[in-house]
Image: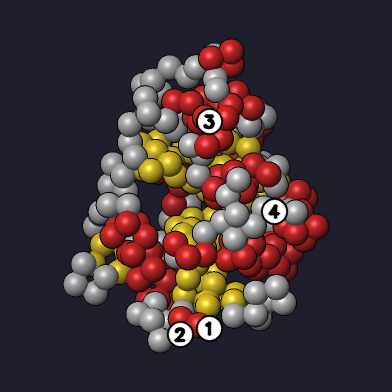
Amino acid sequence: MLQNAPSLHVSLARTEDDLRAAQRLRYDVFVTELGGTGDGVDHARRLETDAFDAHADHLLLRDARRLDSDTDGVVGVYRLMTKDHAAAAGRFYSASEFDLSKLVSSGRTLLELGRSCLHPDHRGGAGLLALWQGLAEYVALRKIDLLFGTASFHGTDQNRLIQPISHLHAVYLAPENLRVTARMPQTTALLPPDRIDRKTAMRDTPALIKSYLKLGGMIGQGVYVDHAFNTTDVCLILETDRLDHASLRRMPRRDP
């Protein structure tokens, strides 16, 4: 249990029941709340699944006050894929959206973060902090050098998202040697820096993306529009020497 949030507990999924609880939370968030769909959506059992789940680790956040819920207390999840996991699955999940060759050939130890979500009652607060603390321990144990993965804006209208997307590219673009590129042409021109309203851009940037940026995160070039999940995705990249417990303690407890 966490000292500052005693009802919360972070662990890896160990059983099929653990995995099903994670997939049920993903259904609640990605399908019911955000309108996603796809081949892995099981409406009858209320599960959001895909072929990568069986090959990955799943970091679970449980709230002891919700153990009798249909998600068995799981209020947050992260899917974690190492290079070995990706080899077993055939590729990293985000390779279908972004060209990852610069990361794969970098010689660094990689960890892909995916399918991250939180129950609405735990967003931007102690729940997110708890997940990141669990992630930091996983990273340290496996000597991970580089985190990456897709992070999403809700919706597929790039014109509506042009302020935050332009701001990310103007300020947080990864250096050339780590700059993955989207497997989709940029159909909407990015705004020049003098036309970006930083306040609007940050307001319209999801809390999870802002949390990565506060820890030193960067983005790849371009976006990928995922119509099945009703999202516009960027690829976030974070060197793990920036990810320490002191940084995690400085993370905001709620979305600014």
**Amino acid type of the residue tagged 4 in the rendering:** Met
Instruction: Tell me: residue 48, above or below residue 242.
Output: below
Q: Which residue is mark 1?
A: 64
The amino acid pointed to by label 3 is Ala
* Image height of 218 relative to 35, above or below: above
**17 in relation to 136, above or below:** below
Marks 2 and 4, the one that precedes in the sequence: 2
Residue 20: image quadrant is bottom left
Residue marked by disc 2? 67
Q: Quadrant of residue 224?
A: top left
Q: Is there a contact, CB below 8 Å, between mark 2 and mark 4?
A: no
- Could you say where residue 105 lies in the image, as x and y percent from the top left? 62, 41
Which mark identifies residue 201? 3
- At 59% from the left and 80% from the top, the residue drawn is 7
In-image side of 250 versus 162 (left or right): right
What amino acid does circle 1 point to? Ala
Q: Circles 4 and 3: CB distance less than 8 Å?
A: no
- SS state under label 1: helix
Element assignment for label 2 = loop
Residue type at mark 2 is Leu
Q: Are marks 1 and 2 in contact (CB under 8 Å)?
A: yes
Distance, label 1 to label 2, CA atoms, is: 5 Å
Q: Which residue is mark 4?
A: 251
